Amino acid sequence: MAHAPSGTNYLNATKGWKSWLFTLDHKRIGIMYLLSVCIAFGLGGIFALLLRLELLHPGQMLFTAKQYNQLFTLHGAVMVFLFIIPSIPASLGNFILPIQLGAKDVAFPRLNLASLYIYIFGASFCLYSIFSGAVDTGWTFYTPYSTATDTSVISMTLGAFILGFSSILTGLNFIVTIHKLRPKGMTWFRMPLFLWAMYATSVIQVLATPVLAITLLLLILEKTIHVGIFNPALGGDPVLFQHFFWFYSHPAVYIMILPAMGIMSELVTTFCKKNIFGYKYVAFSSIAIAIISFLVWGHHLFVSGQSEYASMLFSLLTFLVAIPSAIKVFNWLVTMYKGSISFEAPFLYFLSFMFLFSIGGFTGIFLGTLSIDVHLHDTYFVVAHFHYVMMGGTVIAFLGGLHYWWPKMFGKMYSEFWARISCLLIFIGFNAVFFTQFILGAKGMPRRYYNYLDQFQPLHAFSTYGTWVLGTGFLIMAVYLIHSLRKGAPAPDNPWGGLTLEWKTTSPPPVENFLVTPEITHDPYDYERAGL
Amino acid sequence: MKDNIPVIEHHVAHHFDTAEQEFSAAKLGMWLFLAQEILFFSGVFVAYVIFRYLYPDAFLEGGKHLSWQLGALNTVFLIASSFTMVMGVRSAQVNKRKASINYLIATFMFALGFMCVKAIEYSQKIEHGYLPARWFFGEGASDKLHIFFGVYFAATGLHGLHVLVGMGLIAWLIYRSIKGEFHSEYYTPLEMVGLYWHLVDLVWIFLFPLLYLVG
């Protein structure tokens, strides 16, 4: 299977915009998703830069208090619903999952395309609400903020409701693909760990997202016809909204992090040229995280008037999440031991993830502890914690995966030099922004506040400067990635020496993924057998 | 007993090896979809449980404002429609196309009957002012009656929407059956809509006693 630069592949097999908009090829759908989530990320990033700019000094700088509330709400809603949730599964997952499995496509290609259009449809509702008064409730839409505000909560929640269906259909498609389209020889324990992670993610997507759907629907009914379920003035219970919301949204956190962990397992084996340490433990820890994820939502309600007994249970269950997460981190670390490590850009993202995710995970333990949470609840500490997990974890892994599979997706190499520079800037910028916020939070700075005491000014300013470094890193990345599409050197079939199936086909792959159906006779990461 | 109308061959999609693989994939996908449907409805059921616990009087009284006779009639309609649905699928599996089409039409008619009764019930409630809080002007002993009707309309409204979607799907099946697409070799859509329809039936089986029979 030599590389054939003149051969047809999925990119040039058919031409014209129609061949993209009506394609059923999971690879093209993945690329269109990739473009969409990157646009969403850019938009959410701009909101973040603007709101950090407002916080440079106490008092009003650029925006009024209401505009500030809208900015952080839009930043959160766009990043969560339009970017992070679909980011890895729908873009990289769509592209890589069937190839790693050795299948020609996902189980339901038309459903796959439908989920992309549902995503775009939902996204347009969210965009509409941005231009028609935005939303100022925070991305969590807590009642009674959301029932009392005059901003466009209905169109935003309707958008999130529709986006949920896109997420459900993608998850459903992946579960069926993994169950039914595994070729001969691809047993469950020969699957690359990215697939295990995607499987666990998909289970959460299918089982948790409908609860968000009904919650947002009830919220819309509350706002339009006053069903009274969440409105205390009518006898309803606003805390019920929080229960409903977090019953989805906590598992959703694992929808975000599990695929990232899957990418980490791929990166560590490929760049250390070593079999993963404890394959089954890493695989089953994904499933364990998925199961526990459904039982911890109450840790968002420690100070919302939940019973103490319930809080104690939720706190205990929250600590349990640390076990499978730590199994993964330690196994990756041990995999590196005596490996022949090469420090290319994807592996730098792996290292960043290890560092940042560990901090994010540990601070999660602080917040899961009842007495400490009472002090830290709704402070910048929480903001810093979930950014270390969501951005330090998921976004970093997404970027690692993007760099890892970029040559496979487009058949072009990007500039390794600039990739390293940008990774470094992102790492430094990120820590400058968010490590500072741990300190701010511990000192008592509440989250989502427009104004603050003068004593917090130096730390706030430092955090804002960090966003500029971070932004520069992303800007450089956008430039060299786009540049590589036009001017990049052609990518070999297997630039990193990976062993999973996507490296056994051409770069970019042919329409049906493989010219010759690969034979699967051994473990996915068996470098000793491969003689490397 | 085979109908002598030519059947349309079904071609397995390119990424499947066999028709069995394709069928079992569709079936697993449908079961997953039903799982998410159950979780979707779970929100309304949880709301029911919580508000019945908080305001038992409102729920006892609310149940009395509903006509259990009409509810029972609708229950009969849906159970009968589930039976005709099963027979429709079975008939296609043994190549009795005419019977299959007739059973599907019967299913559609039962569903239509359900929606008509629903319309009668809704209009009675609206007439008496038993609406969600925004338009509530009904008279009742409990001051939280509007919550019961909020839950009632949310639950039965969502269920009704599912019945409407089901009717659309059944109409589509009738159309495809007439074209001769379903036979012993290929009946996947029939089977899948059948599964969906049983779920819609099942949700009602729970809603009926919870809403109508608590009083």
Image (cartoon, helix red, strand yellow):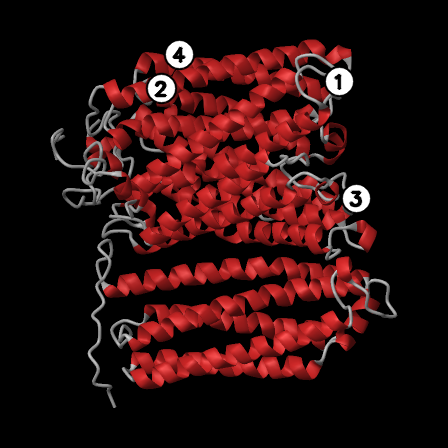
Residue A9 locus on image (x, y percent): 19, 37
Q: Is residue B108 above or below residue A209?
A: below
Quick check: do tags 1 and 3 share a chain?
yes
Check disc 3 and report the residue beneath it: A305
The circle on residue A345 is 2
Q: Is residue A18 left or right of residue A401?
A: left
Element type where label 1 sits in the image: loop
The circle on residue A421 is 4
Q: Earlier in the sequence, mark 1 or mark 3?
A: 3
**Amino acid type, callout 3:** Gly
> Residue at coordinates 58% horizontally, 11% vertically from top-left?
A465
Which numbered mark, 4 or 2, is in the foreground of this view? 4
How many C-alpha atoms fall within 10 Å of the one at disc 4: few (<14), some, or many (≥20)?
some
Most foreground residue, A530 or B146:
B146
Element type where label 2 sits in the image: helix
Distance of label 3 from label 2 (alpha carbons): 47 Å
- Read off the chain for label 1: A
Q: Are marks 3 and 4 in contact (CB under 8 Å)?
A: no
Quarter of the image with the N terminus of chain A is top left
Q: Are marks 3 and 2 in contact (CB under 8 Å)?
A: no
The residue at the far bottom in this view is B1
